[in-house]
Image (cartoon, rainbow, N blue to C red):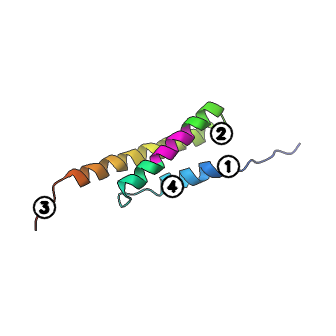
Amino acid sequence: MKTEIKKPDAALVDVANALRDVSIECSIKELEDVIRAGHLLFEDLRAANRCNPLQISALAHRLDRAEEILQRKRRIEAQPKRNV
């Protein structure tokens, strides 16, 4: 009996990589777009039960990290500019 190894969906790989690569240098719009895509994929995966719990957990962790970066970016941009 041979076990078939399934390749991850391209959408999962793309979103997971985009979430991994977010940084404070990204624009707020870029961060919001990646987070929105991540949440949509996360909900689809949970509803369809299409991947293992570790993948879902890793995606959730990356979403949390991206949301923290977005909040930090918003705080930085909300600060008044200092004249030097």
Q: Please, what secondary structure does the residue beneath circle 4 have?
A: helix
Q: Residue at x 42, y 55 (%)?
A: 30
Specify the farthest residue to the bottom. 84
Three-letter amino acid code at disc 2?
Cys
| Sequence-wise first label, 4 or 2 | 4
| Sequence-wise first label, 1 or 3 | 1
Three-letter amino acid code at disc 3?
Arg
Q: Which residue was labeled with disc 1?
A: 8
Q: Which residue was labeled with disc 4?
A: 18
Q: Please, what secondary structure does the residue beneath circle 3 have?
A: loop
Q: Residue at x 45, y 46 (%)?
A: 35
Tell whether label 3 touches label 1 (CB within 8 Å).
no
Three-letter amino acid code at disc 4?
Ala
Q: Residue 80: which quarter of the image?
A: bottom left
Specify the farthest residue to the right. 1
Image quadrant in which the N terminus is located: top right
| Sequence-wise first label, 1 or 4 | 1
Q: Which residues are magenta?
A: 35-42
Q: Which residue was labeled with disc 2?
A: 51
Tell whether label 2 touches label 1 (CB within 8 Å).
yes
Crowd band around label 4 with a 10 angstrom C-alpha radius: few (<14), some (14–19), many (20+) = some
Q: Residue 82 got which mark? A: 3
Q: Which sits in the foreground, 2 or 74?
A: 74
One can see residue 32 in this view:
yes
Q: CA distance from mark 1 to mark 2?
A: 9 Å
| Sequence-wise first label, 2 or 3 | 2
Q: Residue at x 47, y 50 (%)?
A: 34
